Image (cartoon, rainbow, N blue to C red):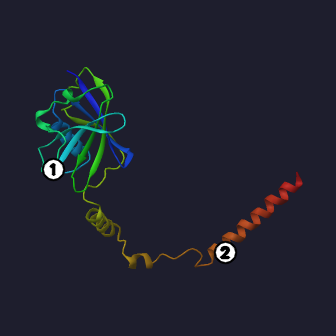
Amino acid sequence: MAILKFRVYFQEDESIYRDIVVKHTQTFFDLHSAILRSYEFDSKHQATFYRSNDSWQRGKEISVEKYDKEYKAEPLIMNETAINTEIRDPNQKFIYEYDFTKNWHFMVELINVDKEENKKLEYPACVRSEGISISQYGTKGLVDKRLAEMEEKYDLKPEALQEGYGTEGEDGSGEEAEETHDEGENESAEEQEDF
């Protein structure tokens, strides 16, 4: 059984990608689910693949379901379409769209075909993850929660910053350090003159 490895790039930043392996007989719905898991997205929204060429032009559509929109041609349905049926060349590309309101776009490229299964993996599986995962719904809630935890853990309240911590040079030590530094420079200049 052939194992297909796809590299799934986030369209806005190609340094963010996930490598996903699937069996060639698995469906586009399996690949769709694996992409969402690998980017830590939920599965609440509409999604579709487009078969593509090297120029990333959209071809045949493979959708979760038939949506209420205008189609040039009837789409294939993900859970009825095996991935191997849409592979046309060794570097086959697909465009994956998720959440038609937010318009998340991913470029999906076949990068390897292996003849042997890895018995330790449950397919489909994400085997490589590069770049920080994008946040599906923004970061506001997450940042606020983490920041509050850090403030509590390290007592990073404004009062704590004012108590016991001065700014550089308050006790005059900054000036003394500068004088010492200048004397050292004079000595090294005199030593250089001797040579």
The residue at 72%/71% (across/down) is 179
The residue carrying pointer 1 sits among few (fewer than 14), some (14 to 19) or many (20 or more) residues within 10 Å by Cα, namely few
Q: In the image, is residue 65 above or below residue 182?
A: above
Secondary element under disc 1, as helix, strand or loop, is loop
Residue at image mark 1: 69
Pick the quarter of the image with the N terminus. top left
Q: Left or right: 182 with respect to 169? A: right
Rendered view: 49 above or below 116: below
Q: Which residue is mark 2?
A: 175
Give the mark nearest the N terminus, 1 or 2.
1
**Pointer 2: residues within 10 angstroms few (<14), some, or many (20+)?**
few
- Asked which quadrant contains residue 138, the reply is bottom left
Q: Nearer the viewer, residue 135 or 152?
A: 135
Where residue 180 sits in the image (x, y, percent)? 71, 68
Query: Picture coordinates of residue 10 (x, y %)?
Result: 33, 46
Which residue appears at 14% of the width and 43% of the height?
A: 64
Between 171 and 79, the one lying in front of the other is 79
Drawn side of residue 26 relative to residue 150, left or right: left
